[in-house]
Image (tube, grey):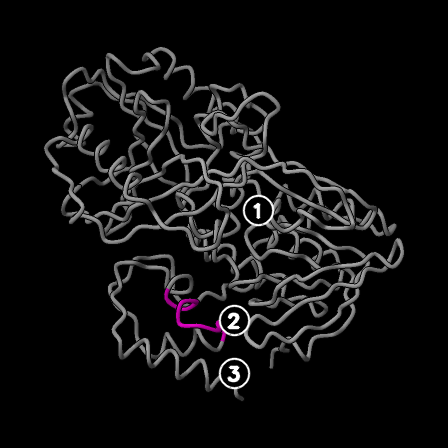
Amino acid sequence: MKKTFLEAPLHFNTIVIGGGIVGAGVFRDLSLQGQDVLLIDKNDFSSQTSMSSSKMLHGGIRYLENMDFALVWEALHEKNLWLKLAPHLCYEKKFYLPIYKDSLRPKWMLRVGLFLYDLLSSFQNSPHSMANTKETIEHFKTIKGDGLQGSGIYFDAIVDDAKLTLEVIYDGLEESGSMALNYTEYVKHEHLSENEIRVTLKDVETNEEREFFCEDIVFATGPFTDKVLKGNHNINWQDHLLPSKGSHLWIKKEDLNINDAIVLTPNDGRVIFVIPQKNMVLVGTTEVSIQDVAFNQKADQSEVDYLIENLNQYFPHAKVTRDSIISSFSGIRPLVKEDSSTDRAKTARDHKYFQPRSNMHIIIGGKYTTFRIMAQDVSRIICTRHHRLYDEGKTLSPLRVKSTVLPFSLLEEITNDQIDQIIQKEHVKSVEDVIERRINNPFIQITDEQKEYIKTKIKAYHQR
């Protein structure tokens, strides 16, 4: 039986604040290194940015233009690694990149970029190719033909972002000294010595507080880091993030009937991915400056209009409307501030690590695909600080327990038996936890009766 907030041990080697993909990666890495680790999140695990991505593991082909070759190399190798480690949660996907007479990047530049993309993957990617105008139109029946000069074809990967985050956590929980608590809020911490920190945590549901002790504390709070650390008396933290809101739409495939992914490059310099996944098409993302860094972001009307407008410019015969939308979602990217730029589209996706005190670690920035590398940067320092051997090969092992009940597929219905298994195995505390992350399929319409069934089963499980 899993321990609750009040039953948890009072001491851990490390406490990790933030249950998104980076915090999950740090938690798993340190657990595999033999440390006792506690992971907490104020909400559910993977409930914010880490479930609001474009559902891709990718090198970031647009970063080539900014000469971010090291980042692209790292991300491509991580993408291809996870295709091997978690094939049940991700798969390779073909992407078309159409080129027009008025495109910002001419055809020769596209050819060079796609070759460089494959080169930086050490040719682990399936090889790129080019399609002429006729082939492109034959493949995408409703695409705009005026000025079309053909398209480049390359390969990236599709991932169930929420479930990968969850399974990384579940893998860490295979180690006996590790524990993960969702709906547990960080309140404050105090450095008692170089190897002892007192951390006050609160159970969000009951408002009960407890004091825990650890040797190291890690903040992996993504876009909320500035907000969490501002005013912290332990450090003089200055804002380091340039938060950017990205929104996505799930579109009915019958209104945009395409079989392969396509990358739209409007002349405003942004990039929009259009990715079919069985019976739906994912469209995103926007790039909007945001001041209110809060949980549970929603797509604004202007963002929805922007995405629909661009879809209809590139697919004028499809006639996508607001009625084509099944659902939408939004998240905040934790972009790191550059000294001279506030252009979010060109801001690097590199991550940064801060160690304001010997036993306090802060990791920000980066991109979903490189979370394992980000986690290693933190774990390596913590292990070295305590004169423990750090084995970087530990995280190269496949996930040991494929704990998510539902497979990575867009099912059309869910059974009560599957719901029961989710509640018993997947650390849920609310109906939303089940629907938004463990089912994670907007095509499945959960009835009021099923919601009541889920609520009843969760209550019964936690009363045992």
How far apart are the alpha carbons under marks 2 and 1? 22 Å
At which x and y percent is residue 227? 60, 48
Locate the C terminus by quadrant.
bottom right
Confirm or deny contact between disc 1 and disc 3 (CB under 8 A).
no
Q: Quadrant of residue 420?
A: bottom left
Three-letter residue code for mark 3: His
Q: Amino acid at mark 1?
A: Gly
* Spot occupied by residue 91 in the image (x, y as percentages of width and height): 40, 46
> Is disc 2 placed on a helix, strand or loop?
loop
Of the 4 image quadrants, the one containing the N terminus is bottom right
Range drawn in magenta: 425-435
Q: Position of residue 267 (x, y in %)?
A: 31, 20
Q: Where, by quadrant of the figure, is residue 453 drawn?
A: bottom left
Give the number of the mark in front: 1 or 3.
1
Point out the residue furthest to the front here. 231
Q: Are circles 2 and 3 on residues that touch, CB within 8 Å?
A: no
| Mark 1 or mark 3: whose residue is earlier in sequence | 1
The tag earlier along the polypeptide, 2 or 3, is 2
Q: On residue 427, which mark appears?
A: 2
Q: Quadrant of residue 114?
A: top left
Query: Residue tagged by mark 1?
Result: 222
- Which three-letter amino acid code belongs to the residue tagged 2? His
Q: CA distance from mark 2 to mark 3?
A: 10 Å
Q: Which mark is residue 462?
A: 3
- Mark 2 crowdedness (10 Å alpha carbons): few <14, some 14-19, many ≥20: many
